[in-house]
Image: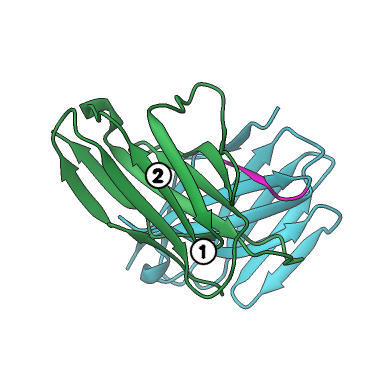
Amino acid sequence: GEDVEQSLFLSVREGDSSVINCTYTDSSSTYLYWYKQEPGAGLQLLTYIFSNMDMKQDQRLTVLLNKKDKHLSLRIADTQTGDSAIYFCAESKGNFNKFYFGSGTKLNVKP
Amino acid sequence: GAVVSQHPSRVICKSGTSVKIECRSLDFQATTMFWYRQFPKKSLMLMATSNEGSKATYEQGVEKDKFLINHASLTLSTLTVTSAHPEDSSFYICSAREVGQGSPEAFFGQGTRLTVV
């Protein structure tokens, strides 16, 4: 199946690190993604990782993938109030035609 | 990154009328576009895959006569919600992938908030 699950809420203080977790069930996924959605807006691609990679870092963002446990995480270093949004993980398979999204994690950053 | 634009961003219509939503890839060509629906505080649900020059492929449970999709060019796909009802009120988002692009990225529009009264 294509079940993708995330915790619904995360609250952190400004300057701390945020870790958003995601689990998926389909081992045939080829790419895994993290998207950010601000209120009333579309989705902004933050980063993606190929399924045969363990880690990818891009500035303040670090993605960790544990393929054995089908667990994906997004770490945001030095979290800012502007990072407050909903974060979706997603998986795609085959020729990238279909994306399956998790329920989204609402990140609240307190000043 | 590539830009996908949706229009309108917000629309209110009366029950029984039809509403058309446009999805355009502004700086690239897209043979395939995707239409999603997002319920409040819920994830995105793939409705259909829109293929340029051919019929759209609908996901199970999505009424193709209710949600008409046309992908007439490599830069434009439209979703028409026919005979709209209040339960069709939702946030609709499109995405597109670039022709021949080796990257797995898909670019999303800003979404359209549909309210049926």
The picture's colour for chain B is green
According to the picture, the residue beneath numbered tag 1 turns out to be B75
Q: Which residue is pictured at 28% across the width and 48% down the height?
A: B113
Q: Please provide percent x and percent y for residue B89.
A: 26, 35
Q: Which residue is pictured at 21% across the width and 28% down the height?
A: B86
Q: Is residue A103 above or below residue B111?
A: above
Q: Which residues are magenta?
A: A95-102
The picture's colour for chain A is cyan
Q: Provide the chain ID for the residue under circle 2.
A: B
| Residue count near mark 1 (Cα–Cα under 10 Å), binned few <14, some 14–19, many ≥20 | many
Q: Is residue A110 above or below residue A28?
A: below
Q: Provide the chain ID for the residue under circle 1.
A: B
Image mark count: 2
Question: Label 2 is placed on what type of residue?
Answer: Leu
Q: Foreground residue, B95 or B29?
A: B29
According to the picture, the residue beneath numbered tag 2 turns out to be B79
Quadrant into which the N terminus of chain A falls: top right
Q: Please provide percent x and percent y for residue A109.
A: 38, 61
Quadrant into which the C terminus of chain A falls: bottom left
Q: Foreground residue, B7 or B39?
A: B7
- The answer to whether residue A93 is left or right of residue A8 is right
